[in-house]
Image (cartoon, rainbow, N blue to C red):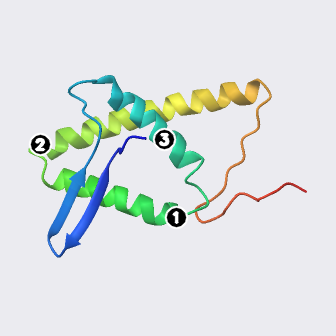
Amino acid sequence: MKKILEVLRYGENDIRFHTDIDPSKDPSIIHQTVVELAMAMMTTLWGGNEQAVLAMVRALAISDLGVSVNRRQMVGFLNEASADLALSLQAARKAFEETGGKVMVFGPGVAPPKSRS
């Protein structure tokens, strides 16, 4: 098990970040992690505490942009990269459905059924 990102608040104004991943040693780990995170956000996370988790992910993103040297460039990069990911995920979903796979979509806070009737 590897720690992707741990963010701990020890007290007021004392937040610390920890990770077991070193992108300088393996640059491809970023792309791999993005894909794995997207799949988790679409599947295993959904129906649980996704609202709180996604709120904290967005708080991290807003903070990162707030301290960015070139915020416009970073927003542009994030927009482009997320659009590319969205297209790839849509293509994968379409291919899955064309081969007979079935995709069920659940809204925020709606847990998948525990068993099928």
Q: Amino acid at mark 2?
A: Asn
Q: Residue placed at 60% from the left, 28% from the top? A: 92
* Res 17 seen here: yes
- Frontmost of labels 1 and 2 is 1
User: In this picture, is 91 found above or below 49?
Assistant: above
* Res 83 seen here: no
Direction front: furthest residue: 1
User: In this picture, is 109 found above or below 3?
Assistant: below
Write down the residue under mark 2. 70
Picture coordinates of residue 108, whole percent (x, y):
58, 62
Q: Are marks 1 and 3 in contact (CB under 8 Å)?
A: no
Direction right: furthest residue: 117
Rate crowding at label 1 as few (under 14), some (14 to 19) or many (20 or more) other CA atoms within 10 Å.
few
Write down the residue under mark 3. 38
Picture coordinates of residue 22, whole percent (x, y):
24, 33
Rate crowding at label 2 as few (under 14), some (14 to 19) or many (20 or more) other CA atoms within 10 Å.
few
Write down the residue under mark 1. 49
Would residue 92 appear left or right of 27 to someone viewing this image? right
Q: Amino acid at mark 3?
A: Ala
Q: Residue placed at 70% from the left, 28% from the top? A: 96
- Frontmost of labels 1 and 3 is 1
